[in-house]
Amino acid sequence: MSATQGETHEFRAEIRKLLDIITHSIYTNREIFLRELVSNASDALDKLRFETSRGTAIANPDTPLEIRITTDKDAGKLVIADTGCGMTREELVDNLGTIAKSGTEAFMKSVADNKDAASNLIGRFGVGFYSVFMVAGSVTVTSRSYREDAAPARWISDGAGSFAVEEAPADTPRGTTIAIELNDENKEYADPQRVKDVLRKHSNFISFPILVDGEKTNTIPALWRESKFSVTPEQYKEFYQFLTYDNEEPLATIHVSVDAPVQFTALLFIPSKGLGPMAFREALHHGLDLYVRRVMISKEVKELIPEYLGFVRGVVDTEDLPLNISRETLQENLVLRKIQTVIVKQILDKLKNLAKENPEKYAAFFKEHGQALKLGYGDFANREAFADLMRFDSSAIAPDADFTSLDAYVERAKEGQKSIYYLSGPSRAALDLNPHLEIFRAKGLEVLYLYEPVDEFIMDTIGTYKELKLKSAELADHAELDAFEGEAPKTETPELTQEEEGSFDGFLKKIKELLGDHITEVRLSTRLTQSPSCLVSPDDHMTSSMQKIMRLVSKDTSIPKKTLEINRDHALIRNLLSIYRRDAEDPFLSKAVEQLYDSALLLDGYLSDPHQMVARINDLLADASALHAK
Ligand code: ADP
Ligand code: MG
């Protein structure tokens, strides 16, 4: 290739699609293109500063680290130049044309769903550079890499299908210059006042000087290093929005300066809202930004915060790491681990205070982030704080009330109560009908309602709370329950006659015979008041939902064998007893018993094939309706 020869490249297919969306469907909030370009310039300067600090030889070492913006109102041009790490010719081609960014596809999906949100989504999805084509007719990127021997290069495109690369003049200084020919509708961005306003709104916390036509515009670098008494709520909010691109206020702000066991400053935020459909991105990007003595080392450092607090955003700045620490060694770094320990305590404390001082706000927090927080059940060191922060639905609260804490349960517990009871189920409506709860309702004992598989693990790890054992209602000890006055609704069925009493054993044997290997045994229930029957685990130590999880893990799809309990005071059972006494071989009896069993399976969430059951119900209905029709 000769010295001046250029070449033309097609944009990669995904990028072409992305550019098409950016140029043709985003009409609001176009100003954020400036934020994206400035943030790229800042990243490039961070990278250069980092290379310098680890002793890498760089081109033009004396050039100050800054971002220079120049406007030409008459020509409708805007230039953004930085003295950062720059790009080689290959990097220009890769970074600005051929390597699709990880968020691109997800971004396009989100935009397809919600066109109005597109401009807000751009930054969050990291498809930043291309946003320049919202305002540009054509863009020229001229760059020289910090590597001493790199040749400068130039990238030119109008954002349609292709871009050109060519050599740049030999005297091109280190860094990147982006020259934008604004298109007709967007000439306003060549007005220095407009540019300054946008920068103040979106780029005020960039830690390098930004000069517009030679005049410095940004004012507040490294807010986290300021004393917290001198920072205004407005500044915190601005910094939060700068950091996250969130339009809302943060739910809570944590600004701490710690001296022992490690020295660091942290400025952390809990967002008011989860990212909803963008949560996948949150998981991908969880982590805090790490600075060493104000120098950015790495963004999204996962070692600084556990996954279950992944919704927390912010920065950490420490004196206790060398500036030249490599990103690769962050993983086993002891200093980071110590910082994490302190940070976790700070966040949990903050949440505990919030829960105490502003329960409604805490409830809102839990709704948004509880799902993530619950995964902290594995954090044994903070088990106590964790238990205090959990919230559950409960039989003792109104259907639409905020979930309850274990503490509030303990407050409501009956005199002499030794356990906190809970039961898993798919929904409140389902649990309200669960036969296992009848005895608890009768005795006025509160039961927590658990809806997610993780909840049972939480109960297992918490184990005991304020001396009350956490116990599944399914596995409740009946001797323990007997201690409480039961105002169980009186059964309307008459006392069994002596003859009936005499045939009850045979009746139970018949049921076992009919169900055969499906169950371990049949016995009379002491827990049922409203339902005719239910299934209980014979080895009273694992709840049915826990078993379900275990079986899922071991890919066991068989139906577990349980004990069938019969409520002898239920009208249905009495009727079946009469049928049995008249004719033990009556086909109606076997159909009804099979149905009892299937109904119990269904309630426990085990029934896998409803067809047989529906056919049987229709049979039974035919029999019953025949009686009614007479
Ligand atoms: P992101 O910033 O999330 O990586 P962008 O689309 O904003 O995505 O930028 C794409 C890539 O182009 C960057 O990752 C970087 O490698 C490169 N780049 C963009 N602007 C600059 C710049 N001013 N200096 C050096 N590299 C840059
Ligand atoms: Mg970017």
Image (cartoon, grey):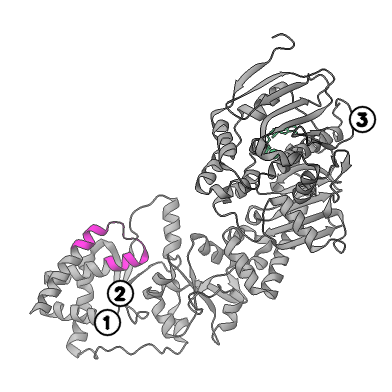
Disc 3 to disc 2, C-alpha distance? 84 Å
Vertical placement of 269 versus 179: above or below? below
Evaluate if marks 2 and 1 touch, with contact meaning CB atoms under 8 Å apart.
Answer: yes
Of the numbered discs 2 and 1, the one sitting upstream in the chain is: 2
Evaluate if marks 3 and 2 touch, with contact meaning CB atoms under 8 Å apart.
Answer: no
Q: Which mark is residue 533?
A: 2
The region drawn magenta spans 598-615
Of the numbered discs 3 and 1, the one sitting upstream in the chain is: 3
Q: List the residue tagged with mark 3.
A: 62
Looking at the rendered structure, the kind of residue marked 1 is: His
For residue 56, side relative to residue 608 (left or right): right
**Local crowd at mark 2 within 10 Å, few (<14), some, or many (≥20)?**
many
Looking at the rendered structure, the kind of residue marked 2 is: Ser
Q: Nearer the viewer, residue 222 or 162?
A: 162
Can residue 135 be seen at all in this image of the molecule?
Answer: no
For residue 136, side relative to residue 522 (left or right): right
Q: List the residue tagged with mark 1.
A: 570
Image quarter in which the N terminus is found: top right
Which residue is depicted at the point 52% across and 60% down? Answer: 454
**Local crowd at mark 3 within 10 Å, few (<14), some, or many (≥20)?**
few
